[in-house]
Structure formats: C-alpha cells, structure tokens
Amino acid sequence: MLGGDRDGTCRIFDPALEYKLIVVHSTYEAAQEWLLEDEYERANGQLLPEKIL
C-alpha cells in the first residue's frame, strides 16, 4: 500500500505483513518506480492511515 504526505514523501506498507513499513521515498515518482521494479500490481480502494498506524 502506498501512502503519501503533504510534503510529497511516500511510504510503502505491506498488507501481508500487518502493514509493516517497507520503504520511504521522497517523491511519488520514486515510489512508483520502486513498485514497478518489483512488479507490484495496482489495487483499487482506499484505507485511512488511522486504520493502519
């Protein structure tokens, strides 16, 4: 799961590991590139940060 902050920082959490923080990127583009490199697939839907933090 990809979550972003107002300053542009993006965090990637793994739902399979109880939403453990996997990696932090300074931009959305860097996070997207990282996800594409590891062949993750996009899933539709939203989850509020309060539900996982």
Image (cartoon, grey):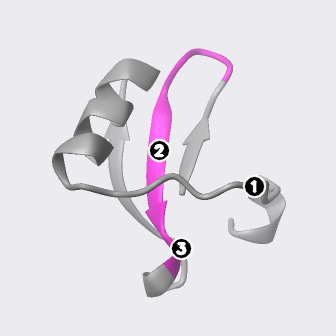
What amino acid type is highlighted by mark number 2? Arg
Q: Amino acid at mark 1?
A: Pro
Q: Quadrant of residue 17?
A: bottom left
Does 19 sit left or right of 41 as displayed?
right
- Give x and y (percent) for residue 44: 69, 55
**Residue tagged 3:** 19
Q: Which mark is residue 9?
A: none
Instruction: Please report the residue visible at 59 percent of the width from the left and 43 percent of the height from the top.
Output: 3
Residue 26 drawn in magenta: no
The residue tagged 2 is: 11
CA distance separating discs 2 and 1: 11 Å
Magenta residues (range): 6-15
Residue 36 occupies which quadrant of the picture? top left
Element assignment for label 3: loop
Amino acid on which disc 3 is placed: Tyr
Q: Nearer the viewer, residue 21 or 47?
A: 47
Up-down relation of residue 10 to residue 23 (above or below): above
Do labels 3 and 2 touch, CB within 8 Å?
A: no
C-alpha span from label 3 to label 1: 10 Å
> Quick one: 48 or 42, which is closer to the camera?
42
Where does the image place residue 7, in percent across and percent down from the top left?
A: 59, 15
Mark 2 crowdedness (10 Å alpha carbons): few <14, some 14-19, many ≥20: some
Seen in the picture, residue 44 relative to 53 is either above or below; the reply is above
Would you name the residue on which mark 1 appears? 49
**Residue 12 within the magenta-colored segment of the rendering:** yes
Q: Position of residue 1 (x, y in %)?
A: 54, 57
- Residue at the image position 68 percent from the left and 65 percent from the top: 53
Upstream in sequence: badge 3 or badge 1: 3
